[in-house]
Image (cartoon, rainbow, N blue to C red):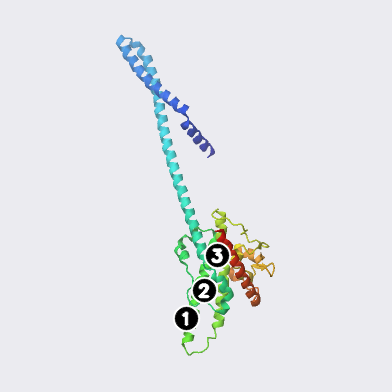
Amino acid sequence: MNSKNRSHSLWDVLEESPLFNWILLIVDFIIVGGIGGSLLAAWHIIQIGALDQLGAVAQFAGALATVGLLRVTFSYVRSTQELVDETRKSREDDRQQRKQEKQEELRSLRIALKAELESMGFFDYWSIEAGKGVPTHDTVSTTVYESNSPNLGTLSQSEIKPVVEFYSLMAIVQDMFKRHGDISVEMDASLIGTDTQKKNRVSAIRRHIERLSILRQHALLAIDRQLVESGEESVDFDLSMNEGQVLSAEHPIVHRNPHALHKYGLLEAVTDGDLVFRVTEVGEEFFSGEVDVRELEPQWEDKDWTEKWLGKMNTIQKKLSDVYKTSE
């Protein structure tokens, strides 16, 4: 392979060399002039009757003809090589163009999915507020995911799993919203009595919403990692999510609302006064794909802490939003 590349490079050098082209021109001149001279010499010999000298002229003409044949062969090889080079270059250009188009399509898919996922931040707050009531109708749009479902295979494996799990669970939650709403309406409009199962339904919905919040964070983190790795985006934060890693309030995971991550033991609070968290062992295992979201269980149910944390989170997120708007 290397020798082939070296010979091709030498050929390119000769092709671009003015001296080489001048040598070919001189050879062509000698061949044409020699053949023409041989014909004139033969004609002259015939005229003077020195037929015994025709053999020498014929030998000279034969040698020139051989050189001419070599020259023609060389020109043919040269033209063939140029055609091969053009074909190879055209194929390489097409391959590069297809590669760029696929990369651009993949980039667009990631950005579109990220935008759709980021628009669902309300899941993070529902995971806190679900005890006070849950939606009774379809509240989210999955247009990007559904319209691009045939192209999801172009994503990396680290992206596919959390993205598909999130949207699959969301379909279940949306169905739960609808059923819960239908039952609530029926109970309100009838004389059957009190809806004794409402508390259980709300509890189940809340558990699913919390897991949706966790999966949303995982999917967004996986997409962010790939965008950074491909050079499409740059961030000032470590997205590795290793055990013991400290996340400040400005970190994307915290900025997007880490309530469910903390509640299910993926993050632990470093201090009570600030929104600073540390990645736990379970957190590292989950974000690396080793632990399924269905295996996670709540680690605490402190409602007072939740309300205090929610108020602090709202204040900090407002400040962060103002900073981001200013930087834009």
Residue that mark 1 sits on: 182
Q: Position of residue 221 (x, y in %)?
A: 57, 62
Q: Residue furthest front?
A: 326
What mark, if any, has residue 173 been given in the picture?
Answer: 2
Q: Is residue 90 above or below residue 277?
A: above
* Amino acid at dot 2: Val
Q: Residue furthest right?
A: 271
Q: Is residue 294 left or right of residue 38?
A: right
Give SS at disc 2: helix
* Amino acid at dot 3: Pro
Q: Is residue 153 above or below residue 185?
A: above
Q: Is residue 78 left or right of residue 328?
A: left
Residue that mark 3 sits on: 162
Where residue 2 sits, quadrant-wise, is top right
Tell me, yes or no, if residue 143 can be seen here. yes
Q: Position of residue 9 (x, y in %)?
A: 50, 35
